[in-house]
Image: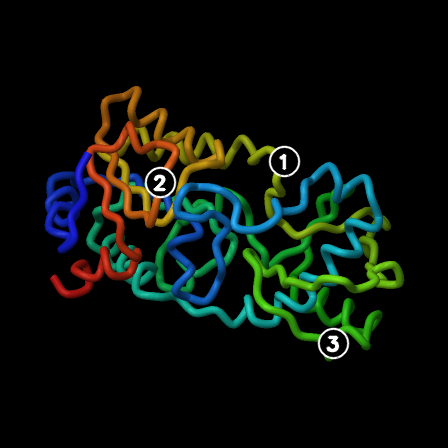
């Protein structure tokens, strides 16, 4: 494994492999102002995200989640694609990406012009019912949260990953969370929570893309979560070379033939200049 400060090795890797399977993670969106979860050693920068089991079992956990999300969504929804998103959209337009899969829930690849993206962990711009599977757009749900909890609209807090906000020391007990308007079921963001399984159809579609590809490119993911690491494992089993652009350690370091420790936009900038 080797690194390349000037991106020359990464350019060579991309030029040698005509059909790339690209997997992106939180590091791809940090330059758009969305914080990531992991430090350079792959450890958690803050407390682990809310677990699916706790969210479903405890009304207090749900109140806390939605109160923080009400604040965090305001800036999250205004995030814009950065150079890394635009570079990958350019690479796709050139016909060089067999499949683009993201662990992010921000829709910034789509905003940059990428098509047929597999949003492995879902989308934060939708809310789903855990009972009847009804999907709701986030914006009207946000307005309903504000209508029910007007005093929270004046609060502000620092951003946390995936539309969360760091609200500490507040009493969430009176925060009013609406139920599903169709069946009164529990509503959650249409994303895969920690401890929840990725829908099998998404995994199968991504694996089919990996099978057709001749190499894998990881952009901004530590691969510490198995939902992404499994694709590196599969690529290695099939003898497909893997390159990664990531600041710090990844779970798949021993599987890589190339690692570039630069910010994603800087490492991929040559794609927009060539």
At which x and y percent is residue 215?
Answer: 23, 34
> Can you say which quadrant of the picture contains the C terminus?
bottom left
Residue at the disc numbered 1: 196
The tag earlier along the polypeptide, 3 or 1, is: 3
Residue 265 visible in rendering: yes
The tag earlier along the polypeptide, 2 or 1, is: 1
At which x and y percent is residue 213?
Answer: 26, 34
Q: Quadrant of residue 21?
A: top left
Residue 110 visible in rendering: no
Residue 258 located left or right of residue 25: left
For marks 2 and 1, give the CA distance: 24 Å
Residue located at (66% from left, 52% from top): 189
Q: Which mark is residue 249?
A: 2
Residue at the disc numbered 3: 153
At which x and y percent is residue 93?
Answer: 25, 56
Looking at the picture, tell me which residue is in the foreground, 69 or 222. Answer: 222
Q: Residues within 10 Å of mark 2 (few under 14, many from 20)?
A: some
Q: Quadrant of residue 112?
A: bottom left
The secondary element bearing badge 1 is classed as loop
For marks 3 and 1, give the CA distance: 30 Å
Compared with 148, 29 (above or below) is above
For marks 3 and 2, give the CA distance: 39 Å
- The structure's colour scheme is rainbow
At which x and y percent is residue 125?
Answer: 59, 60
Residue located at (25% from left, 34% from top): 242
The tag earlier along the polypeptide, 3 or 2, is: 3
The secondary element bearing badge 2 is classed as loop
């Amino acid at each position: 494994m080797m690194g390349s400060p000037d991106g020359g090795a990464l350019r060579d890797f991309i030029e040698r492999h005509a059909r790339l399977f690209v997997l992106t993670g939180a590091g791809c969106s940090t330059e758009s102002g969305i914080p990531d979860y992991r430090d350079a050693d792959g450890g958690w920068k803050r407390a682990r995200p809310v677990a699916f089991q706790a969210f479903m079992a405890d009304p207090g956990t749900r109140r806390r989640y939605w109160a923080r999300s009400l604040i965090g969504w305001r800036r999250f929804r205004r995030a814009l694609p950065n150079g890394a998103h635009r570079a990958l959209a350019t690479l796709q337009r050139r016909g060089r990406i067999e499949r683009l899969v993201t662990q992010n829930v921000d829709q910034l690849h789509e905003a940059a012009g990428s098509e047929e993206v597999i949003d492995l962990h879902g989308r934060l711009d939708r809310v789903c019912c855990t009972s009847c599977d009804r999907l709701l757009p986030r914006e009207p749900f946000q307005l309903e949260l504000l209508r029910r909890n007007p005093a929270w609209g004046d609060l502000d807090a620092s951003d946390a990953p995936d539309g969360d906000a760091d609200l500490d020391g507040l009493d969430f007990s009176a925060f009013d969370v609406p139920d599903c308007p169709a069946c009164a079921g529990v509503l959650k963001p249409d994303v895969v929570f920690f401890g929840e399984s990725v829908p099998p159809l998404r995994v199968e579609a991504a694996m089919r893309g990996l099978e057709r590809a001749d190499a894998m490119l990881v952009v901004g993911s530590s691969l510490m979560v198995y939902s992404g690491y499994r694709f590196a494992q599969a690529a290695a089993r099939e003898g497909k070379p893997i390159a990664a652009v990531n600041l710090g350690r990844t779970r798949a370091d021993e599987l890589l033939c190339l690692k570039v420790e630069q910010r994603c936009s800087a490492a991929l900038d040559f794609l927009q200049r060539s």
